Image: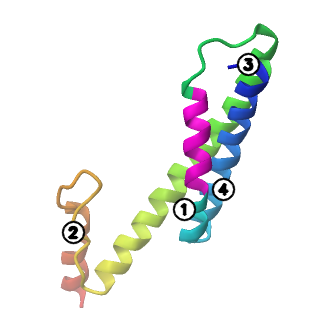
Amino acid sequence: MSGSRVLDAALRLRASLDSVAGALAWPDVTGLLMAESGLASALADLGAVQRVDPADRAALAAELLHARAALARCRILGASASDATTLSLAAQGKAAGYNRAGATNSRAAALRGELKATL
């Protein structure tokens, strides 16, 4: 992959992560789904990189730092969205069920117990 294509893939990665963060910030499922294909494409292109032209390394490193910051923002917003969903379900008396690993979400179960105890 040529240097300009590598840098383009890094730019697309950051743009996709920014789109994901925006969709998470404004509970926008459609926007989140639309960002998925761009993110997958950018990651696939970056995964195919075998070498980076020394002239492009500084620009690529800077862009990847921006992408890393966007990813951190996505993680924070995703955790907030997950917590809001868990709290909403608990307030409705509904079980959150399972977490991402498939195990029972003990934090949600404990929260439901605490909410019921106060009602």
Q: Residues within 10 Å of mark 2 (few under 14, many from 20)?
A: some
The amino acid type, in three-letter code, at marker 1 is Leu
Instruction: Please give the name of the residue rendered at 26% of the width and 68% of the height, measured from the top-left corner.
Output: 108
Q: Where are the magenta residues, as a range?
A: 35-46
Instruction: Please give the name of the residue rendered at 51% of the width and 50% of the height, measured from the top-left corner.
Output: 75
Q: Earlier in the sequence, mark 4 or mark 1?
A: 4
Q: CA distance from mark 4 to mark 2?
A: 29 Å
Q: Earlier in the sequence, mark 3 or mark 1?
A: 3
The nearer-to-camera label among 2 and 1 is: 1
**Residue 14: image location, x then y, percent:** 68, 42
Q: Earlier in the sequence, mark 2 or mark 3?
A: 3
The amino acid type, in three-letter code, at marker 4 is Ser
Q: Secondary structure at mark 4?
A: helix
Q: Earlier in the sequence, mark 3 or mark 4?
A: 3
- In the rendered image, which residue does mark 4 sit on? 19
Q: Secondary structure at mark 2?
A: loop
Please, which residue is most extreme toward the right here? Answer: 55
The nearer-to-camera label among 4 and 1 is: 1
Q: CA distance from mark 3 to mark 1?
A: 29 Å
The nearer-to-camera label among 3 and 1 is: 3
The nearer-to-camera label among 3 and 4 is: 3
Q: Quadrant of the C terminus?
A: bottom left
- In the rendered image, which residue does mark 3 sit on? 2
Q: Quadrant of the N terminus?
A: top right
Whether residues under marks 3 and 1 lie with C-beta atoms below 8 angstroms apart, the answer is: no
